Amino acid sequence: MTPLRPTALLAALLLALALAACQRNPRATNEPRAAEVTTTSAPSVGVKEVVPPAADVGFPITATKNTTRVAGADPIADAAGAAVVTFPSESPGSHPAVVALADANDWQAVVLAGLLAAPPINAAVLLSDGDRLPAATQQALDRLAPTGSPAVGGAQIIRVGDAARPAGLRTADLTASDGFALARAVDAFQAAATGHTSDRVVIAGADDPAFAMPATAWSAKAGDPVLFTAADRLPAQTRRALQAHQQPRIYVLGPPAAVSDRVLGELRRFGSVRRVGAADPLRNAIAFARYSDAGFGWGAVDPGHGLTFARADRPADAAAAALLATHGTYAPLLLLSDGRRLDPVVESYLLDIQPGYTRDPVRGVYNRGWILGDEATVSPAAQARIDGLLEIQPVSDAPPSSQPSQ
């Protein structure tokens, strides 16, 4: 019997599962080169459909009633899965114009690539393994078949840092001598595509990726660039980038251990400065998800939100989180510690924003969760607990009585 054809979403999710088998092979990054744009002819690529066995669709790991898992064995596979979920590439208009490509071994490049997912570039984000394209990335790239973006001179690929160079595709290269200079280059590239600089900038520490990860999703959603700083000094490249923004609102993500008060004092020369964050990565991500200031920040302090969950020790999963912040549920990134269980601080936050209804859940609002990583990364038990805390719950609408019961 011919297997039943799944919906486009289910096909994309199952493709993510298929991509999970790609192997890790970390490589050291190469010496960066100056930014340039090269053009070559593009090959003919098609859409590859994955049809699963009808009797095995992977539930409840692939999805529960309130969660969907992008079940990659590593961040490379997660990024590939998130890319085809976001850009199903099944019909005209569902392909991305351009793909941003970063090296999974360079967490700073991954964080910076998120900005290119914002308008007007609207890039999908994929990961290489050093100068090699893993099977998961190549398969996703073949499926996505980027058409080329007028916003970036017709490029189909934007290389961020020393990522691999796919053969036969028009490529824009953003490379620099270090992460500070690369952040400035990506910021300038986005400003050129947009036609103006942003009036808001996120500053993240360059030493601890777990504190910087949540900035990626916001950058992708809002188009606010991320610039890096050393913990105790503001680098020259970051100073020059801030000068180009002409007194922006500056939001520093992370505690003083990541970005010192001394650096905050230096930043005040370039614009207004506010710190957002907490002492550990999990609380820091929650603080950023809650934060709101005059149009900046997720403001996720009540029910009705998408949320992405990733391990704090897998910084390259920020690439997948960037795409899930730009379409569908527009989800901020929350972090887990070891993924074996739901951390109490995250559980407390989910309880705080859990949806409720008084008469009819159809009229309620809902939370939705994306889980990044396979079962070895985030356990089914943790996923099930997240699912339960996202579920809309009945609540009483009767006011408390001030009279003793009769």
Image (cartoon, rainbow, N blue to C red):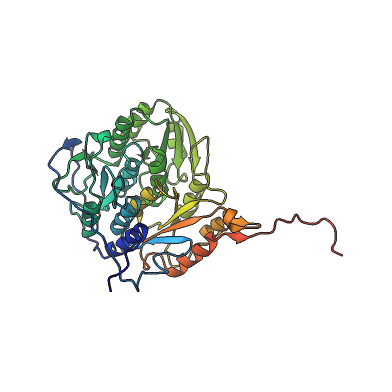
Up/down of 4 relative to 214, above or below:
below
Up/down of 368 relative to 154, above or below:
below
Residue 9 is drawn in which quadrant? bottom left
Tally of numbered tags: 0
The front one of 129 and 212 is 129
Residue 266 is drawn in which quadrant? top left
The front one of 256 and 127 is 127
The x, y position of residue 391, in whole percent, is 54, 61
The x, y position of residue 171, in whole percent, is 19, 41
User: Quick one: quadrant of the C terminus?
Assistant: bottom right
The x, y position of residue 99, in whole percent, is 26, 45
User: Quick one: quadrant of the N terminus?
Assistant: bottom left
Q: Is residue 2 visible?
A: yes
State the residue at coordinates (46%, 66%): 382
Whether residue 65 sits left or right of residue 94 in the image: it is right
State the residue at coordinates (12%, 42%): 41
Q: Is residue 208 visible?
A: no
